[in-house]
Image (spheres, helix red, strand yellow):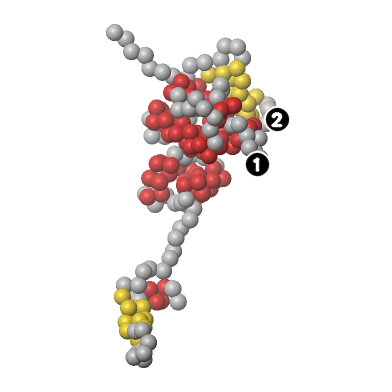
Amino acid sequence: MTTTTSSPLTSLRALVPHRIVEFGEALQIAEQQARRLIDLIADVDGVNELHIARMPRIKIVREDLPVSGMSYWNGQQWVIALSRNESQTRQRFTLLHEFKHIVDHGSTARLYPGNKRQSGEQQAEAAADYFAGCALVGKRELKSAWGNRIQRVEDLAHHFNVSFEAIRVRLAQTGLDVVADKLPTPRCARPVSTPRYQVQRFRTARPRYAQRRYA
């Protein structure tokens, strides 16, 4: 008895429901697809060009293009064309962006019906950007790096081999760009001299170090 393993494209496309979705859900699907891609590849160095190029019926080429990239079916295989004049980090992001368009083939009408604020095409482009960011800088991996004290934009960009802007966007999307520095909750309170006809008043007490820090 033989078993067959579905291709990564088939696996990612299987996450799309057979109904029209709101754009917010389309972004959730894009993130789920990115997560599945990371897990399927299972490479500690993340998703790279070889992983995409080794997939069945996908070819990657570099050309002099007026845009960052494009993708199309040539009758035999999917072609992802990248601008050879852009940086490697930009090309890597564009590669995943265009790969998302290939993943969406056959489902674009359901995923991106458009609304009053965005056309279907604009939604598709935004989702492709979101997918690329999630695939190159996975939420789980980003939070792990952050927990290991890799927190400067420059260090994170080097760690994930992406641009500074890609890291800034992912930090914002995951909420890690907001560093709370709130006053600590007072440990206790001290009574304040209060007339008998009034409700007893209290003064919060803070450690001296906290008073110095937040003075």
Residue at point 61% right, 20% down?
72
Residues at circles 1 and 2 in contact by the CB criterion of under 8 Å: no
- As drawn, the label of residue 184 is none
Q: Is residue 50 visible?
A: no
- Whether 131 is drawn above or below 204: the answer is above
Mark 1 to mark 2 CA distance (whole Å): 27 Å
Question: With 184 as the anchor, is 173 left or right in this view?
Answer: right
Residue at point 54% right, 30% down?
20
Q: Name the residue under label 2.
A: 66
Q: Mark 1 points at which residue?
A: 117
- Whether 7 is drawn above or below 212: the answer is above
- Mark 1: amino acid: Arg
Identify the secondary structure beneath mark 2: loop
Dot 1 or dot 2, earlier in sequence: 2
Residue 36 placement: quadrant = top left
The answer to which of 214 and 60 lies nearer the viewer is: 214
- Mark 2: amino acid: Pro
The picture places residue 162, in percent across and down from the top left corner, at: 52, 40
Residue at point 54% right, 46% down?
169
Question: With 201 as the anchor, is 118 left or right in this view?
Answer: right
Question: With 77 as the anchor, is 189 left or right in this view?
Answer: left
The picture places residue 25, in percent across and down from the top left corner, at: 50, 37
